[in-house]
Amino acid sequence: MPRFILALDQGTTATTAVVVGPDLTCLAKASNEIPQIFPQPGWVEHSPEAIWGATTTSARQAMVAAGVDPKDCAAIGITNQRETTVLWDRATGAPRYNAIVWQCRRTAPFCDALKDKGLESTFRDRTGLVLDPYFSGTKIRWMLDNVTGVRADAEAGRLAFGTVDCFLVWRLTGGLTHATDVSNASRTLLLNLRTLDWDPELCDAMGVPMGVLPKVVPSSGVLGLTKGIDFLPDGIPVAGIAGDQQSALFGQTCFAPGQSKCTYGTGAFLLLNTGATPVPSRSGLLTTVAWTVDGKTSYALEGSAFIAGAAVQWLRDGLGFFARASEIESLAASVPDSGGVVFVPALAGLGAPYWRPEARGALFGLTRGTSRAHVARAVLEGIGFEVADLIEAMGWDTGVPVAELRVDGGACANDLLMQFQSDIVGIPVIRPRNVDTTAMGAAMLAGLGVGLWTQPDLSRMAATDRQFQPAMDAETRARRLGQYRGAVARV
């Protein structure tokens, strides 16, 4: 039996494990949901033990489904929800609090306090990020200030911080490796983009002791070996890590500057490879690390829309519009348009390019003739509109309009949404044959890390499923975008 890569994709709502063959075929996959915890409005948490449990269960199920022997695992690749924050005890490995999820807005007052101190430009210049509750650093600070005993234990060196990748590496290696890759580290508000290491002044301003921070390592290469877990033998290398959006960019083989992708998951995340130099944004986008591979670091511009697939889940679970999320396409397609309804997907505030955490979702243009189908179509269009804003901002920042968009994630299977996306931005939208590009990127990085393949090999093996071509005229496009942006101004 040829050796395989085990890719662990730990996402916001579930953990998926994918068994990937040496020719990049998906041999099998398994997914298990994790409970969402909402202690109060605007707060979102996960149980770290539930994350680990879903990860181990999915890994076992995927290997059984693929019919592989665990000892034939060549390497493990990890990709993860990036800014979600975990603090745990170094001696016992036990979490000291629930993981605070990237969507959580509880640290907005602390972000405002840092802005009032005049620190926003300092953080922006050094990290490429904005002072927003989205990022990990303020979440660590909240735990230090609000969980009994945590600050004292952190300052005494008894606690470890990690984003979810780091927590999984710790568990996989039996507590021997405390490390995160540079793409995840770049999402903390604590990493200096130029030194690619933790910035002491930023840590001090954030009130985070540097002793809790993990080692920053490249995205590809062996950083630890499995030890003491029951679903894999000891000694399997953990050889690839990237935050979920950077992993999807890699999985889409966007290796060259100017190539871009959008992942439609819980949120919508657009990344553009900018090459070896970080590009500052003047348009409310983020400058981030894409990956470090073979000693070379690539940077990216990123636009994050917090709500995409989550809006469809809201229609399903909150309003009972349908039983399965996939049913939204047929419902929305049953009407020729949204009937004048405009949806602003600000259910967790507005991300790039607006950065308005106080904004809330809204439906405009409702009449007595508005049906469930019109609302469903407006929700899909709202996702497309927010991505269009991101694409336009990237063109402003780089001086070069985005020429095409590669797409992935669960919602990219929705043909109606993908066609509208192509129409409203006026460029081709390209969907790969394998839309699990987040997990595939982790597998690619791990395979590179153990010499299973090269980047040219990966480019040759990539395959396209369908291209969507724009069919909307420029006048209609401008009118529809104007309606959406007018609605955004009112929330």
Image: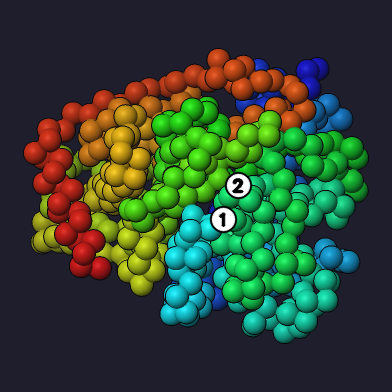
Foreground of the two, 477 or 397: 397
Whether residue 343 is visible, yes or no, is yes
Q: Residues within 10 Å of mark 1 (few under 14, many from 20)?
A: many
Which of the labelled discs sits on residue 344, or is there none?
none
Q: Residue flagged by tag 1: what amino acid is it?
A: Arg
For the image, the number of numbered tags is 2
Report the quarter where the N terminus lies. top right
Q: Position of residue 148 (x, y in %)?
A: 72, 84
What amino acid type should be assigned to the residue bearing mark 2?
Answer: Ser
Q: Which residue is mark 1?
A: 187
Residue 219 sits above or below residue 432 on the image: below
Q: Residues within 10 Å of mark 2 (few under 14, many from 20)?
A: many
Q: Are marks 2 and 1 in contact (CB under 8 Å)?
A: yes
Tell me the residue that label 2 is attached to: 183
Note whether residue 263 is visible: no
In percent of width and height, residue 437 lies at 54, 33
Percent across and percent down for residue 95 are 75, 68
Give the structural element (helix, strand or loop) at label 2.
helix
Secondary structure under tag 1 reads: loop
